[in-house]
Amino acid sequence: MFDSIGNLLTPSEFSKICENTKCQITDHSAKIDVSGVHYRDLNETLQNLVKAKIKRISLNNVHGQRYIGTSLKGKIEITIDGTAGNDLGAFMDGPEIHVYGNAQDGCGNTVNSGEIAVHGSAGDITGYAMRGGRLFIKGSVGYRAGIHMKEYGENQPIMVIGETAGDFLGEYMAGGTIVLLGLNLEKDQSHRSLHVGTGMHGGRIYVHGKITGLGKEAIIQKLDEQDRLFLKPLLTDFCKYFGYDKDHITNLYCYKIIPNSERPYGRLYAY
Amino acid sequence: MNIWKLNNPHNDPKVIDACSLFGMMDLTGQRFNAKDPVRAIANMHERGNGLGGGFAVYGLYPDFEEYFALHIMYTELEAKKKIESQLEKWFDVIKSEEVPSREANVRDPPIIWRYFVYPKQDYTPQSQEDYIVKKVMKINTETGKAFVFSSGKNMAVFKGVGYPEDVADFFNLEEYYGYLWTCHGRFPTNTPGWWGGAHPFNILDWTVVHNGELSSYDANRRYLEMFGYNCTMQTDTEVLAYAYDLLMRKQRLPVEITAKILAPNLWNEIEEMNENERKLHTTLRQTYGGLLMNGPFSIVVARHGQMIGMTDRIKLRPLIGGMKGNRLYLSSEESAIRLIAPNLDKCWMPRGGGAIVGRLGSTEIKKIIAPEAVIC
Amino acid sequence: MLKNYIYPEFFVERDLNKCIRCKVCLRQCTYETHKYDAEEDILLSDHEKCVNCQRCVVFCPTRALIIRRNPVEYRKNSNWTQDTIIDLKKQAETGGIVLTGMGSSKPNLTYFDRLLLNASQVTNPSIDPLREPMELMTFLGSKPEKICLKEEIDGINLQTRLTPQLRLETPIMFSAISYGAVSFNVHKSLAQAASESGTFFNTGEGGLDKRLYRYGKNTIVQVASGRFGVHKDYLNIAAAVEIKIGQGAKPGIGGHLPGEKVTEDISETRMIPVGTDALSPAPQHDIYSIEDLSQLIYALKEATNYEKPISVKIAAVHNVAAIASGIVRAGADIVAIDGVRGATGAAPKVIRDNVGIPIELAIASVDQRLRDEGIRNRASIVAAGGIKSSADVVKIIALGADAVYIATAALVAMGCTVCQKCHTGKCPWGIATMDPYIAKRINPDIGAERLTNLLKGWSLEIKEMMGGMGINAIESLRGNRLALRGVALNSHELKTLGIRLAGN
C-alpha cells in the first residue's frame, strides 16, 4: 500500500504522513483521523499526500484546524468531517472541499479558484475578497460575507448561501455574484441583514426573500433573461450538493441588487 | 517590584490584548470539573501567545459559601505581611492558605494566597459588598505590591502567565468542581504579561473575559472613576467588570438594559422603534453615553447564577453560543464547543450588540432584544 | 485735530493691462478706496482707505487687483512692533480706546496645532464612515446619574424623565452673533442653515427679529446684561435660553453698539430709540454672586415652564474650573465656555488680545474638575473661541466638550476675510453692517447654503477622523484623552491638558 507512494516522497516526508495521524491510504485516496493534530502538521501532511499523487483525501474529527486547503494547488478533493477551522481554503487555487459540519470565520478568504461546499453554516467574512472559484453554503453566513469580492474577465467568483446572512453582506463589492436563498425564512419573514451592498460598485446579489436593510449605494432590480440563464446552473449545482429539489429551487422568485453608480463617491471631495 | 511597572513596563497608557474565550454553564447547577473547559480553551491555542491564561470557577468552595474568598497576589513577602495585618483589622479571617499549585510551564509565579473572610461590622448585604469593593480598591492602590484578583463568595479566579492549559495545570484545576466555568487565552501586544493582568477580571462575584480592544477606553474609565472605581490594571477588561458592577449590582438594572447601555442600538434603528422603546433607548444613550463600549469586543461575563455573552454593535469579534441538554456553551470558535459536545441541540451566532444570557434554573436561553442573526 | 502720523497699512496694486475699467471695484468697495478718472479713463486707488477686505480682488472679473502690505515699514523690532507703534500713535491722536473687530490674532495662544490625533493600526480596526454607521448625534442638557425603571404589563418601561435636552445632528452649533453687529440677512442665513442641518444658532445679545420666529425650534436665545429683546415670546419660541455672563473676546467688560448701527429694525428688536448707542453693561446687574445666578436660572426655568434647557455662557478666565463647577451646581443645563480667541463686532484691542485664556486649557481643566467632583453629568459643556477646522472639533471633544460653537468660521464661510474692521459698520461683504444697501449683498438662501456646506464638510471630516480611530459613536470620543498626544508642549501643559507627549 505504501510502496506506491513511497518513491514519490523523501523518507522524512513519508514518515511525516502517518506519524501524527491515523491514516488509511488506498490507490489515490487517503482517510485520516486528525484528532489532536496541529494544523501545521495537518496541512503539511496534505501537501505530502498531494505530492504523492493522492487525489481524494478525507479528514475525520476535524476540530477547528485552520487554513485547510490553503497551501494546495490543482485538482484535489478534500472532505472534512467536523468543524473546519478559520480561513478554510484561504488563498486557495484549485482544490474542491466538502465540509460535513460547519465552517468558522474566513471561509473562502481571497480564493483564486476551486470549490467549497459547506453542508452547514459558515461564520463571519465568508468569501472575503474572493477573486474566482465557487462557494456553496447550505445554511447561513455571518457578518460581512462577500465583502470586497472582485471579478475580471474569466475570473468570476460565486457564492451561494442557502439560508440567511448577517449585516454588511456584499460590502464594497466590486464584482462577482452572491446568491442568497432564504430557505429558512417563514412566510412573510424578511432577512434581518442590514447595510446589504453598502459601498457596492460592481457585481450583483441575487436574493430570494425580502431585504429591509439595503445599503445606500445599492438598488433593487428585476431579473432579466440573462440573469435567469446565469442563475440556473448555480442553483442546479446547489441542489446537487445539498439534496434539494431542483424544480422548487430554480423557480423561486428572486430579484437582484446592483450598485446604483460606478463611482459612488465621485462628488465627495472638494477641490 | 511595583505591580504597575510589572504589568505595564513601558508605561503604555493601556495594555492591549487579543484572545480566545470560552464559557460553560450547567443550568441546573450541577457541578462539573475542569476537563471539558480546559480542553475547549486549549483547542483555541492559536488565538493566544502564551502570555496569559485564566479561569473563573463558580461553586467550588461549598464549605465556605458564606465567606468572601479573597485571592491575593503578592510580589514580595513584605507586602503580604502588611496586607494580612490590614485584613485582620477589617475582617474576621476564617481561613487563610497558600493557593495549592504544582510546577508547570508558567512564567515567574508570584506569591498567591487565599483568605475566607467576613466583614467585621454588621452591614446589610448591599453595603457588605460595597465594603468589600472599597477594601479591594484600597489594597490594589496602596502598596503597588499586592493585587486582589478575586473577591467573591464561593467562586474563584485562577490566572497567570502561560497558556491556559498550563495555568490550569499549575493551579491543579482538575481538583475543582463548579457549575459555571469561564476561560481565557491571552495574546497581549505590549507587555510580557503579568499574572494580575491576565483575564478573567473580577470584582465581587463578577468576572469578565474579553476579546478585543475598547477604543472608548479612556472615556469609559473617566466615567467610572466618577463613581469611585480605580482602574489600576489599565486594561479595557477592568473597565467592563466595573461597568457591570455599577449597572447591575449598584443600580440594580436588569441584564437587558445593561446590554443596551454597553452596546446600544444605532440611532437609525432607534428611530424605527415604537414610542415607549424609542424613549427608553434614547434616554439610555443620553444618560450613559460614557459607558458605550466602542471598538471590537466579545465578552463572557459571569456572576453567581448567570452567564452573559455579548459582542460589539457591529460584530467585529466572533462569538458562538451552543446548547446541549442543560449545558450552555459560549465560545470564540465553534470548534471548541463541538470538541466537547459534538452534537448540539442548538447552535447560534448572536447579532452585533446582542447578548446571550443563561440563568440558573431555566433552560430558556434569553437572547436579548435582537435575537440571533443566524443559526448554525 | 492732531495730524495723523500713520501711513497706510495696505497698498492697492492694479495691473493696468488687465483692468477693463468695468468699475466693479468702485461699486463693491464700501470704504470709497477706488475712484474713476473719466478724463484719463483710469481707476485710481486711495491706499489710505483700504482695509484689505479682498472684496474688490474677488469680484474683479480679470483678476487685475492685488492688495499688498504697504512696503514702508518701521525698522524691525521685537518689542516695538509695527502694530504696537501704530496703536500708540492712534491713541496719542485721539485720546481714546483703540477698537478692533473679530478675534485675537496674537501668536502662541493656540494649542490645537500642538495636539495630534490617534488612528487605529492592527490592534483595533478602523471603521469606514462612508459604508458603516458613524454616529455624531449629540444631546445637550443635564443627565441623571442613573435611570429608574418600572415593571409594567407590556414589559420594562422607563420611569425617569430627563430634563429638557437639545438634540444636535452634528456637534457643531452657530455661536452668538448679535443682531446689530450683523445684518438681518446674516441672522436669517444662520437660522436657515441651522434648521436644515439639525443644529442650532444663537441670537446673541441683540434679540431676535420677529421674522425669524419661525426658526424658533433651532434657536438659542440669549439673555445678556442689556436684556435686549427679552420678552415672553422671545423666550417661548426658542429651543433653549442662554444667560450671557461674558464672551472670550472681551471678558469682564460690556458691549457697545454704536448709534450708527441702531436702525429702525434694531430699534424695534432691542427696544431702544433709533440712533442711540446700545450699551450692554459689564455685569448682569442682578448677578453679583453665584446664588444670584442660580436665582436667574430658575427664574428663566419658571418663565419657560421648565421646558427648555438653560445655558450659561462665560469667558474662559483663570479660575474657570471653579466657576464652571459653581454654575453647574447653580442649576445650569449647559455651560458654554468662550476662549481667548473668541471674536466680536467691536472690542477694545487691548482687552481682546490680553484678557482670557485659551479654550483648550479651559475645557481640559473644567472637564477634569467636574469629574473629580462627580458632577460632570449634570451639565453639557460647549466650547467656543477660534475653532477653525473639523480637527479642532474632534480635539476639543476629546478634551471633554460635548459640542462646539463656531462664529468666525461661519462668517468666513459666508465671505468674511477677517479684516477686523467690523466696528466701522461698513463690511463690504454685507455681514457686519446695518446699512441696508450693503446688507443686501448677503442673500440668505446663498448664505445658508454656504453654511450648510460648511457643516456638511466638517461633519464628513469628523466622521473620517473618528472612523480612523476605530470609534463609531461620538460618546466614545467625549473626554477620551488617550485619543490625543501633544508636541512642543512642556510637562505642565501636558498635565493640564491631561494628555501625554507624542511617542508615549
Image (cartoon, helix red, strand yellow):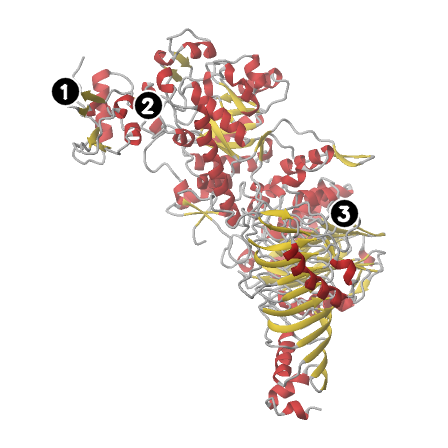
Residue type, numbered disc 2: Pro
Q: Quadrant of the C terminus of chain B?
A: bottom right
* Residue occupied by mark 2: C428
* Residue occupied by mark 1: C39
- Foreground tag (1 vs 2): 1
> Residue C386 is drawn in which quadrant?
top left
**Is B200 or C87 nearer to us in this picture?**
C87
Mark 2 and mark 3, same subunit? no
Label pair 2/3, CB-CB below 8 angstroms: no
Mark 1 and mark 2, same subunit? yes
Q: Is residue C306 visible?
A: yes
- Picture disc at residue A189: 3
Which residue is drawn at the image coordinates 32% and 19% (left, top)? C426
CA gap, disc 2 and disc 3: 63 Å
Q: Element at badge 2? A: loop
Q: Residue A242: x, y in percent?
A: 76, 66
Q: Earlier in the sequence, mark 1 or mark 2?
A: 1
